[in-house]
Image (tube, rainbow, N blue to C red):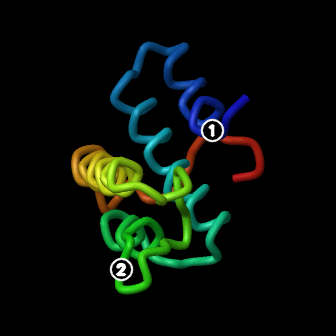
């Protein structure tokens, strides 16, 4: 089961959707940190991990980035992730709850 669903699952079963979304969002940041070795959180983490930057090669790419379309897709997913972090994160909710190993 993917991490974000495992993190959100206990909250979904209790019908606390906002908590489920918050936990899933936090698990995405954890997964990005685990895959890249980066620290940080939220939009800063997303920018560092996914932005094309000067080299054109991010820490984490969703595709081969060979075409303009693929580069646009990468930028779009970066913006989507930044929006998700900005919408559903809060400073007091920065740790996972109800996830095995936390």
- Across and down, in percent, residue 48 comes to 41, 76
Q: Nearer the viewer, residue 96 or 31?
A: 31
* Residue sitting at the far right: 101
Q: Is residue 81 above or below residue 50?
A: above
Tag 1: Cα neighbours inside 10 Å, few (<14), some, or many (≥20)? Answer: few
Which one is in front, 28 or 100?
Answer: 28
What numbered label is drawn on residue 53?
Answer: 2
Q: CA distance from mark 1 to mark 2?
A: 36 Å
Q: How many marks?
A: 2
Q: Is 39 placed left or right of 15 in the picture?
A: right
* Mark 1 vs 2: CB contact within 8 A: no
Q: Residue at x 63, y 38 (%)?
A: 98
For this view, does 87 lie left or right of residue 60?
A: left
| Upstream in sequence: badge 1 or badge 2 | 2
Dot 2 lies on which element? Answer: loop
Where is residue 8? Give x, y as percent: 54, 31
Crowdedness near tag 2: few (<14), some (14–19) or many (≥20) residues, C-alpha within 10 Å:
few
Q: Is residue 41 above or below residue 93?
A: below
Q: On the rendered structure, is 2 left or right of 29?
A: right
Question: Residue sitting at 50 percent across and 18 percent down?
Answer: 12
Residue 98 is marked as 1
Quadrant assignment, res 53: bottom left
């Amino acid at each position: 089961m993917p991490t974000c669903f495992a993190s959100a699952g206990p909250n979904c079963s209790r019908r606390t959707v906002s908590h489920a979304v918050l936990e899933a969002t936090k698990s995405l940041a954890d997964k990005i940190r685990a895959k890249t070795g980066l620290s940080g959180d939220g939009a800063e983490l997303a920018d560092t991990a996914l932005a094309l930057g000067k080299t054109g090669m991010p820490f984490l790419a969703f595709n081969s980035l060979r075409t303009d379309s693929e580069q646009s897709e990468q930028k779009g997913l970066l913006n989507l992730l930044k929006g998700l972090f900005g919408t559903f994160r809060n400073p007091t909710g920065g740790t996972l709850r109800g996830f095995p190993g936390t």
